Image (cartoon, rainbow, N blue to C red):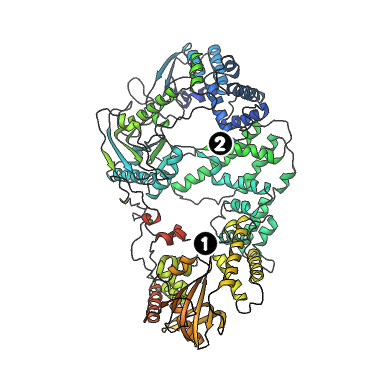
Amino acid sequence: MIKFLHERQRVHIDDDRGARNLLRGGLIRGFAGFVDGWVRDLPQVPDATLYLLVEEAARRTNRAEFVRAAHLGGFCASLARTILEFSSAGCGSARLARHLPDAPLAAAFTAVYREVERAVEERGLALRAARLERAAERIGREGLGGVRTVWLHGFDTFTEPEQRVIDALARQAKVMVSQGPSVHTNGDRPRGRPGRSAHATFCAPSVERECEEIARRILEEAAAGRPFHEIGIIVRAAEAYIPLLRSTLGRFGIPAHFHFDAPLDRQPAVRFLSGVVEAMLGGWDHAQTLAALRLAPRFADSMVMDRFDFAVREQIPEAGLGSLKALLVAPDGHPLSTGAERVMRKIDRIGSIEEWRLFNLSPADWAEQLRELRALFRPARPADGIGHERALELRRQSAALDEFDAALDEAAQALAPRRQIRLEEFWRAAKSVLRLKGLRAPDRRGNVVHAVGAREARHWTFPVVFVCGVTERQFPRFHAQDPFFPEPARRELNAAGIRVATAAEFEREERALFDSAVACASALVTLSYPEFDSRGERNLESVFLEEYGGARRHANIRIAPGEACLAPTRGGHVGAGHARPGVQIMAPPLLEVLRERTARVSPTSLESYLKCPFQYFARRTLRLAAPPARPEKRLDFLLQGSIVHETLAEWYVRRQEDIAIVFQRTFARAMENHHVPDGYRRQALRHAMLEDLRAFAAGDPWPREGFESRVEQPFAYSLGESVRVSGVIDRLDLAPGGDAYVIDYKYSGRRGAKDRLEDETLLQAPLYFIAAEKQFGVRPAGMFYVGLKSGVVYAGWKEASSGPDLPAGLPIPADWLARAAERATQAVDEIRAGRAEPRPDPEICRLCDYGDVCRRSAAARRPAVEAEGA
């Protein structure tokens, strides 16, 4: 007996007595593998190669109907899918031309199809239908070599070419065909089609919460004694759910095997090799080269690479390996460190492919040449006793490199074999193949949750099954009308004997997939869906939830947005998404470091602590640096404020130059020092700053007669016995009577300056007041914030005895300075005591650079969507 299985099906074979038999591996095959044995001399064209041939055919035929879309990847992918559909139905271009339906694009499609068939044949390849035809012919002529029984299992329907193979088999042996779920089981129930199982449904506020609830229920099953391998997750919309399920199950510590192809071009090893080629073809643009180097094994996670990364980002856009290596060299010409020397050697190794830009080679020679890239990827030798996750990562890495080499061969197959081409042309084809190919690395773990697609689920049985994403447009999936053969044309083709899919067949197939997904469960099936999509719009519950089960109603449980789903780590503790209150550093050596680092504090650093202790801890104590801004974002609010402050400091006292001239000089210097590229945004902001400064110079309401102005005044004074407060006062104006006024510029609008008067966490104003008295020996009579953006506004405090010609201000509170000194001292004491808990605030968190390492709650990170009736 030979047993043929639907692709990727896994089964046990039983003999007539029900005892398990072990048959030779060659007697249990996938249908495609069986066909391969009969037509080894006629290789099937790979899907990625077919896509490239379709691109070339669309360009070469130059049909007027397609000329505006032929260069678009999505359009060519749609062409390739429809060509595969017609070929699988046994309809070549000649047969299609004889039965051409009444469709506007049918003739143009047939012309491209004919050109694709010619290109496939020219390369010694074949479409699947042609291989099936030849296999049927050879089986009929040569027989099956003594095989008397053939069993085909797991097929729902057969295409016309497949039916010809089966007819040929039937003339040589007894053929049995069975449908329905596979006899592959992961539980203890009898093999065969599952019977009835218990049902439940739940609705979560979002897809993230849906995945978390699935994980929580899996842990409940595991806690009750059920092995993980008896649990399955069936996914119809893989692109929406698989990334989330991977991260969620990993966060919950649930081992899982995902039976899905991962895009080959997203694998780290392939991204590194591709990035090197892209960087070389781009003239070693620093941004592209850095992106590739960050994926180099043994480099990405080093401190040297982090510093190098920041140095490169600060000066891009730039190009050339010489200037890149210069960032790793000290002024004396030697590498900055041993690690920097290793990075320089890595740059030299990737730079060795520079000469490839000069070559003209055949596609096959380019494939051979590019295989040398593999030598650039040198991972560290794995240590003994590595865990499952590391072993899987290494298997994926090795498989990805093998598939990279295979992709080069497929690209070479698609291009004219004897034509000499440049690397740019070959690499365009190779990139397309890499984008289209998938990777499924072997995973031999036994006790894992299995996540499978709806089609593959037909061949599995689990005691417990979760079917997620049961909404309209996902399960059932939305069926977009074919652009080349709309529904009337497809019905016309079916009437002519060409069996291509219609909308009705698509709907029947979706229903069959759902029924088989539910039937996979032998004990419990849980159906779930998110109430809202990523845009906050309400999802429409799948019609299958209403129809399936007849009079049996599912127990519908609605998960409220506020219900927490704690994610246990492998240590059994609550995950990092849920912080414990009162987080505090207790180790004496660390407390001593905190004391040393708070020997001198600034008013703004104390304000940062009062707003959020963890933000202060990350920025001031750990001194974590945020990644440098992208070139187009470098002229940010901080840099704009710095330019305005520097301009006013140079201009205000002398006022001998036009403020525009001082600004232009300051602005040019800042643009050069911060590598800000020219462009519309830079010019628009330059114009806005200049207009604001001109408005201040022409319409400043502050009286100047009789005042002595001092700008950029540094100060440092003691507050209590062990705290030194330091900073710089933007401007200190001394009145004729001896009163002093502290001026602080803010490059913000009218509302921003006035809001500072109401914020009790701000200590800058009273601490500057104290500095004026202690450092400069003057009597402070007022403090004003000056908003300069879109008009000049003064907001602050002054004594009632101040002159009437001064801007209006609030009265100075009686105990203002004493309360500020007490709060500042208390803040320093708390910092030194090790307090570092997060204090979530939506406005602060939105702009915080340290959100990825913050222990604030998930609820503070993203607002929950309130569900009606939750």
Would you place residue 726 above or below residue 582 in this image? Answer: below
Q: Identify residue type, mark 1.
A: Ala
- Residue 305: x %, y % from top left: 58, 59
- Residue 488: x %, y % from top left: 49, 20
Query: Disc 1 on helix, strand or loop?
Result: loop
Nearer the N terminus, badge 2 or badge 1?
A: 2
Q: Quadrant of residue 325?
A: bottom right
Please rate how many residues cluster around mark 1, counting C-alpha atoms within 10 Å: few if below 14, some from 14 to 19, many from 20.
few
Most extreme residue toward the front is 804
Q: Nearer the viewer, residue 7 or 700?
A: 700
Q: Nearer the viewer, residue 549 or 157?
A: 549
Q: Is residue 360 left or right of residue 807?
A: right
Would you place residue 594 above or below residue 856 in this image? Answer: below
Q: Count how many numbered circles sit on residues in the image.
A: 2
- Residue 538: x %, y % from top left: 37, 41
Query: Disc 2 on helix, strand or loop?
Result: helix
Q: Which mark is residue 449?
A: none
Q: Is residue 719 left or right of residue 485?
A: left
- Residue 779: x %, y % from top left: 47, 86
Q: Whole-Å distance between the Cαs marked 2 and 1?
A: 35 Å
Give the residue number, with chain letter if any, for mark 1: 626
Q: Quadrant of residue 723?
A: bottom left
Q: Nearer the viewer, residue 224 or 21?
A: 224
Q: Identify residue type, mark 2.
A: Leu
Give the residue number, with chain letter if any, for mark 2: 436
Q: Quadrant of the N terminus?
A: top left
Q: Is residue 41 visible?
A: no
Q: Is residue 835 visible?
A: yes
Marks 2,1: beta carbons within 8 A: no
Q: Is residue 181 left or right of residue 495?
A: left
